[in-house]
Image: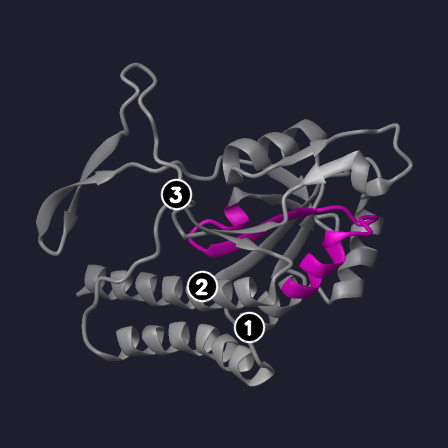
Amino acid sequence: MNKTLKAGILIAMLVVPALVFLLLKGFGQNHYSLPRYIPRIDSASGQVMTVRRELNGREVTDTLFRTLPDFRMTNQQGQVVTQAAVKGKIHVADFFFARCPGICPKMSSQMQRVQEAFLNDPDVVILSYTVDPKNDTVAALQRYADQYGAQPGKWHLLTGGKREIYDLAKRGYYVTAKEDDTTSTNLEDQFVHTDKFVLVDRDGVIRGFYNGTSREDVDKLILEIKVLLHESNNTAKTTTS
């Protein structure tokens, strides 16, 4: 495959989704929506739980999805951050550690792009949780924040209890974050954490997983945040009309 053809395919992959979004946005009412992840399962029956709600003037049965549980962390400024920081907002979450020599710098560079895309939109927030809270003190997180231009109030780098962080990764965002081979001199072996960025909507429901080391996947994330913003704006207009 020659370079021109490869370039053409790459451009099409990036442009077509954007054109689809613009068309959906510009032509009347549409029913395009991002998928929702992690349905609630009834522990007794093993069945997916449902709820009755109104849609376009009629009552329908809808799947009930898991939402982000409560948490209490401390950010790079030493401020306590709870679920209230993302209540009613769209947020992107990831897991990292400041000494990470491998995928973390790539992920943080891509998260810079997400921050830049929504820097002036207060409805979009970024939460980055350290998997190494013992070493990632407030001061260490502030240095890391300075390195990647994390803006106060927009991009929170969070530390807290190790068990709480690992439980939140597993039971809140449904990704991997854990301590591994602590005897290894290789930092990459000491901690295991996902490379995924997780997109969470205003209701605390997961709407997407993206490879945080991939520029193309982060382009998709940025686009789908815009889709969610448009979706929630339409819902608000419908509610108030």
Q: Are marks 1 and 2 in contact (CB under 8 Å)?
A: yes
Please say whether residue 28 is visible from this viewpoint. Answer: yes
The circle drawn on residue 37 is 3
Identify whether 231 is placed above or below 81. below
For disc 1, the neighbor class at 10 Å (few under 14, some 14 to 19, many from 20) is some
Provide the residue span drawn in magenta.
84-110
Toward the left, the furthest residue is 58
Residue 155, placed above or below residue 182: below
How would you rate the neighbour count of disc 3 (Cα within 10 Å): few for under 14, some for 14-19, many for 20 or more? some
Q: Measured from the top left, where is residue 192 in percent x and y?
A: 71, 37
| Residue holding disc 1 | 117
- Name the one closer to the observer, 55 or 111: 111
- The picture places residue 202, in percent across and down from the top left corner, at 41, 52
Q: Which amino acid lies under the numbered mark 1 shown in the image of this protein?
A: Ala
The answer to if 89 sits in the magenta stretch is yes
Tell me what residue is drawn at x 19 percent, y 70 percent: 29
Disc 1 versus disc 3: distance between alpha carbons? 24 Å
Separation (CA) of disc 1 from disc 2: 10 Å
